[in-house]
Structure formats: C-alpha cells, structure tokens
Image: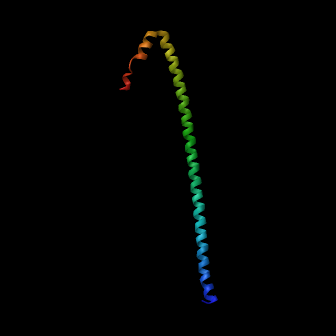
Amino acid sequence: MTLSESLSLVGPLSAFVALLIVVVGAFRTNTAKVWKEEAEAQKERANRLANDLTEIKNRLARIERENARLIQLLTALDPNRLAALRYSPDPTED
C-alpha cells in the first residue's frame, strides 16, 4: 500500500472518528440535560409532598386540640356518659 493510498483511507476514517466523537459528545450532553431536568422535577415533587405533609400535620394538630376541648366540654357536662363512651366498642369499626 502506497502513501497516497494510505492517506486516501485516513481522510474518510478521520471523518468517521470525528463524527463518532461528536455523536457521543452530544449523547452525553443530552443525557446529562435529561437527568438534570428529571432531578429538578423530582425535587419539586418532593417539595410539594413535604408541604402537603406539613399541612396535614398542622391540620391533625388542630383536630387533636379541638377534640381535647370537646372532651373537656363533654366531661364538664356529664362525666359518666364520657366514661361509658370510652369503654363501649365503636360501631363504625366493623
């Protein structure tokens, strides 16, 4: 194989290698971009869920305070009835 034949093969081969490098680089860049977008979306979802959980905990605390107040009122009205309600089975649990 002569020098000119070798050089004629090196030209297309180097073009192919350059194309391969560009394609791999673009793939890596796009892959990183997709993963970054996915991570940001998951972070936003986690923040929304954390806010929802905080809201639920606040509501539960408010309900527990209201229940405690209602128990105080019921006890003040008729302590024996409250004791009977506490020891009777809950009909809604069936």
Most extreme residue toward the bottom is: 2
Q: In which quarter of the image is residue 21?
A: bottom right
Say if 63 sits above or below 21 in the image: above
Most extreme residue toward the left is: 94
Say if 64 sits above or below 19 in the image: above
Is residue 15 left or right of 68 when viewed as pictured? right
Q: Residue at x 52, y 17 (%)?
A: 69
Is residue 88 left or right of 53 when viewed as pictured? left
Q: Residue at x 56, y 29 (%)?
A: 58
* Residue 71 x/y as whole percent: 49, 16
Say if 14 sits above or below 69 in the image: below
Q: Residue at x 59, y 78 (%)?
A: 13
Q: How many numbered markers are drawn?
A: 0
Q: Which residue is drawn at 46% across and 10% down?
A: 79
Is residue 91 left or right of 64 when viewed as pictured? left
* Residue 76 x/y as whole percent: 50, 10
Q: In which quarter of the image is the N terminus?
A: bottom right
Say if 51 sits above or below 12 in the image: above
Q: In which quarter of the image is residue 15?
A: bottom right
* Residue 89 x/y as whole percent: 38, 20
Q: Quadrant of the C terminus?
A: top left
Is residue 27 left or right of 90 when viewed as pictured? right
